[in-house]
Amino acid sequence: MPPQRKGKNNNNKNNNNNKRKNKSSFNVKDVFEADDDDRSLKRKGHDLDDVDDYEYDAEKGVASEDDEEIESDDAFNDSDEERFEHFKFSGSNKDKKSKHQKEDEDELSEQEINMDESDSEEEEEEDGEGFMDISTMLDNSSDNEQSSHKDALKSLLQQESDSESDDEALILSNDDESDDDNDAMDDVKFIESLETKKRKRDETEMTKKRQRQQERTEVYEENEFNLIARGTGDHTESNKKKLDLNDLMDTMDNEGTFTSMRKSLLELDGKGKNVVKSALEAPAAKRIQDRADRQAAYQEANKEVGRWEPTVNEIRQAEHLHFPLLNQADYKAASTKKNITSATLASKFSAQTTMEQQIEQALSQAGMKDEELEEFEALQLNKLSVDEVQKRRQELQMMRELMFRSEIKAKRLKKIKSKSYRKLQRKEKARQELQAAGIGHEVDHDMDADEQMKAAMSRAEERMSLKHKNTSQWAKRALARGQQDEGTREAILEQLKRGEELRKKVQGIDSGSDSDYSSDDDEEDENHKDDITNDLEKLQNEIDEETQDTQTKKGLLGMKFMQEAEKKKMASTKAMVDDFQTEWLNEDQEEKEKSETHNGIGKSIQNNPGRLTFGTVKSKMSGSSTTPKSDIKINLNDAGQIKKVSHSAAHTTRTSGTIETKSALDAELDDNDNEVSPWLQQVESRVKGKKASKKHNTTKGKIEDKAELNIEKIKKSRKGAEEKPEEIELDLSQTLSMKDKKKLTASIAGGNTLTTTKEEEEEEEEKPQQQKPLNKKKQDISTVTSSQLSDDDNEDYSSDDGMIHSSNKMAFQQKELVARAFANDNVTQEFELEKAATIKEQGDQTEDLTLPGWGSWGGKGMKKKKNKIIKTNKGVDPLKRKDAKLKNVIINEKRNKKIERYEITQVPFPFQTMEQYERSLRAPVGKEWNTRDTFQKVTKPKIITKLGTVINPLDAPFK
Amino acid sequence: MGQPKTNNKTVNPALAAAERKYQRGKPVPFKKVRSGKLRGKLERQEEKIRDAVQSAARAELLLGEEAGYLEAEGIEKTYNYRQDQLSKEVDINTSQKIFNLDLPDHGPYSIDYTRNGRHLLIGGKTGHLAAFDWQSGKLHFEVHVNELVRDVKWLHNETLFAAAQKRCVYIYDNSGLEIHRLKNHMDVTKLEFLPYHYLLATVGNAGFLKYQDTSTGQLVSELRTKLGSCATMAQNPWNAIMHLGHANGTVSLWSPNMSSPLVKMQCHRGNVQALAVDPTGRYMSTAGLDGQLKVWDIRKYEVLQEYYTPRPATSLSISQRGLLGVGWSTHVSVWKDAFLTKQNSPYMNHIQPSSSIRDIQFVPYEDVLGFGHAKGVSSIVVPGAGEPNFDSLAANPYQTKKQRQETEVHSLLDKLQPDMIALDPTHVGRMTRMTKQDIIRVRKEEKEQDESARYQKLRKKAKKHLKRHENVIEQRKVIN
């Protein structure tokens, strides 16, 4: 509390000071104010605790009598006055006034007292309150005070000392004047004057006195200035006591001369008819006034600031700012620069260069300048009368209106989604088209019919081709659904079947044979021919029969003229058939002759007598003939290797047959000695391959018949061409079925080789370990050996046998070889194991956290613990691994910590989603990826300042 | 504003195609973004990107050179054309690019071209090192180190190169002066250099993959492959991942940030003999001792094509325009469109008589293929191999000394950190794909690990101290 109080006192003092300033009339007496202060302070200190009650809780049970005791001056002291200055108390105006008056009076009196007091300040202090009540209080009050209001006093004392020091200076001037002699007298006087105030100093004393004084009716002197309403704490009560106009008026009669006066008085009271505004209302409380002022000021300021808003926004939103800022004119120029259009350019255009001038001159000469054209148009308009112009305008308006309407209608129609409507629309359109066509071709009815026929045909065609093709909605849906029940599947199959049939029907049986015919298979060709001849014969027979049957016919058909007509018809058909037959037979004959001529060497390719083919003949022969025609002699040496292969001159194709048998055997042999290391085997075979090739050369040399040398040559080339496919066939057999290989090879090679295979089998049994690596040229086994090894024999290579794609037939060989070569390396197995291990390692990890032996018994018959605490560390789900579907790949799922440094965990501010942010990074900024122009644009700084220029603050930006 | 918009619509199909090429993903849909500020930002950004695409497409007009291939008429085949036939037909400048350096004494040669394709470095097995501007024929140096040289590699430009010698890797300058001896890199068989990271990667008989930063000299990482000796290595130029081929037929992909391989693929049944990665980083080609040559899509880790070579290929190279060069025994065959479709016949063939091919490499920005073989170094013309238009910001074949110095400084300033190497290089600056809980958990774990490691260290230290002082009798202990 003390500091507060101190503040209050200070306030008090300040207020006094203020007052001093205000009341210039009292300036002279300021010197004594300190005293007044002191006293008021003392008073305050006296009734420290009750002050509040006095001031605010007046209604709280303070008796009216008590009220009277306390002077309004005292209760409502200076500070309060200051504080409540703006409060409007009902009927307080008068009080205030009077109070001020009273105050003045007080001050006057105090002045006097002070004048008298002069030097007694210190004394007063030293003696404390002793001065105030000499008789009783000195002994009593001082003790009481010290005991009960110790702290209050302390603060007061301090306060007083403060004020003293302040006031001392002021007092000094008067000090000299004062006389010591007067002291005693003055004191007495002073005490007397203070009699009323004395009471308040001591509460106990006061209550006693109060009781005593209750008998008195008035506290104050009764005079004209001291009315009853004044000086009461309780305003409501005082109001009642206050004289009112009504009180005065009650006494007046309603009649007589007083009516006018009464009226006027009523008006004054604000009740009559012509209410006269009463006196000026008191101004609003300062607080409220201030608030209103502030609000008004805020609005005003807002308006002022708001005018800056567009400019500030512009600057804020600008991508780049140039400082010093461009002024408005520059801004405009900059903005217009952006919107350069051809129109703006054209409007400002003026010919400058010589060429431009020339062109302009030429244009003006031709009268083609814009201005001239406009003038011309204007002239044209001038010629028209007003009515005409109006008419034209109306027409135009009409047109526009119609166009607009039709547009709207079209839009509306376009929106219609109804299928039936569309259908109708289509039909309507078609009909209209037909009609239009009809109008055009009314004369030509045949044409129309033709067209109809065509349309019908096309429709039928469409039906045939599209239907039964699973293109119907139902079929599509059924197929899309995937799993069909038995019924639907059958239905679909049925449909397909039907579709197939229909298609066959439409295309005719010819198409089937056609496709066969296109293939060079001669056998099929012959069959076809046979069919045709058969058909012809059948037809002839039928005709014959019919001619014989004519006699048996009866009725209309039995009539003579009908029969004759029939006969005629028959004769003509027969003639046709005969014609055809003769033609056909001739052709057949020719072909036969041709084939006979070429049978020895080869067959000429169709329409190209210059080229001969040899392969086709062979295939035909092997297919059709069952008797062995080849005379192949294979001489085997002791080692089981083929010493010599000789061919009979007439047959060209048998060599390949022998190779087949040989390689089949070879494969079998391979099968037999599977345990032998593939490496060893291959090296061996390679070496043998070389030998074999040499032998092959020797066989070449042994061909003696020089006459047949050419043919032999042809055969050689033929053989080269044949070798590849033959080998592949064999390889297929190797890879497919090892068990019944013999049968397979036998069937492939045909019956003609059977004998030789038998022979060889016998040989084989004798020397099962041997191999016959004839014709190993293609099988390049050395692929598996290291490159150093392969460097030795470069001679084997020709440039065209480069890489072979694995899907190529040739690659089967290689694949097989590789598989055999690396059979012992379980590389893939190891890899799979490794992958399994890594999956396990990077997957969920379980950890048993149960303490061993804890909570369970040991020893024999120990049960396994049920409640295990198992902690699982989540890893990567094996199914969700990136390599889950890749058999030969292990992708590391471990976290790369170092990478995380370059990743962000939150979307940076202006962006709201990850997508927005990441897509913003998609375009590179560097000059390596952009043109110079883009690079400069993209990297342009936000703020550009011009060096060496003053950047002024924004000046009034109001546009 | 209507006017420019109509102008923007590119009617020219070539331009439209070019624009499509430069389009990098779909634009961000910004129209429904509520925040006005963000919407404006996105709108402006999209506009910028669109402009960039357009201007890039238009700038293609400046790429004057066109690529072309050898074309055969009638029944002729391109693979039948021989170099001597070609040299008669082509212009003098091109015909001069067909040459053969006869160096029969110093064993098979490994070669390397600089990134601008201007300088050639050759290293003979017996120790013959030489570098020259192969187009002008100006020799930079020629030395004989009297030691086995397994591989040579240019560093960031033609001023420095590394040579894998018998024991260590050495770095020389372009006058043949030895500058560094990298004693950490022992018994190295293969060298690779990552130009944007300034990393020299080596792998050797010990099976360690080591990365050495050539700008700071630090050894960035040492990775144990655990797959034994390795002599096949190639870099993926797109993401700077190292591809190693191993004896068990696997190919492993490495980044210096992970101690285990990022990806391991079972590619062959035998030793992986050769490896090459497409400049776009999409395709890989491998050749194994099992006589197979495979083409892989390394985005999906799937095999695209499989071929059987007559002999196991010893060296592979992929040109800038996607020609695949295969060196096997004495042959070099070049395959066109090998990554797109199955090929039946090679594009070109070349035989180096009685001299097995050691190392082949396409020359950047040139239609030339160079190869080192047992009896020297040769260069052949392969039409359509190189990129016809060079980008001087990437590599400038005609750069002057000043330009070279300038680019060196720039590239050093733009150097990428080894930490950034990952399978997907676009991860930098991206949002993390981890969930919030994961992040929290991971951080917690890391903290725990750090702490435990610290304690372990302390414990170890204490243990060491105790052990050291086991037999020491301290005075204060005795007194007590």
Image (cartoon, coloured by chain):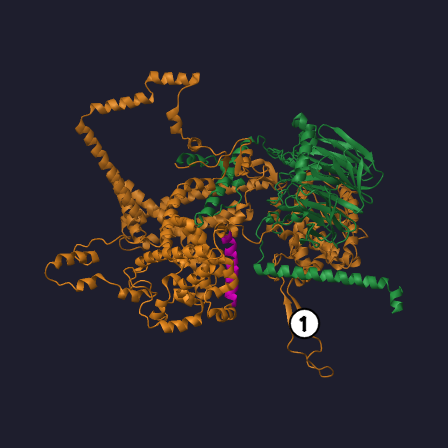
Chain colours: A orange, B green
Q: Furthest residue to the left?
A: A256
Residue position marked by numbered label 1 in the rendering: A849
Q: Quadrant of the C terminus of chain A?
A: top left
Q: Is residue A368 above or below residue A417?
A: above
Q: Position of residue A386 (x, y in %)?
A: 18, 27
User: How many tags in the picture?
Assistant: 1
Q: Position of residue B216 (x, y in %)?
A: 73, 43
Task: Give the residues drawn in magenta, as a range.
Answer: A150-168
Q: Position of residue A105 (x, y in %)?
A: 36, 56
Q: Is residue A163 magenta?
A: yes
Q: Is residue A438 magenta?
A: no
- A316 or A899: nearer the viewer: A316
Residue B200 visible in the displayed image: yes
- A582 or A691: nearer the viewer: A691
- A168 or A751: nearer the viewer: A168
Q: Furthest residue to the bottom?
A: A861
Q: Position of residue B363 (x, y in %)?
A: 68, 35
Q: Residue at x 77, y 45 (%)?
A: B189
- Which amino acid, mark 1? Leu
Q: Is residue B65 above or below residue A582?
A: above
Q: Is residue A132 above or below residue A526?
A: below
Residue B82 visible in the displayed image: no
Q: Callout 1 environment at 10 Å: few (<14), some (14 to 19), or many (20+)?
A: few
Q: Dot 1: what SS?
A: loop
Q: Is residue B17 left or right of residue A730?
A: left
Q: Is residue A917 left or right of residue B461?
A: left
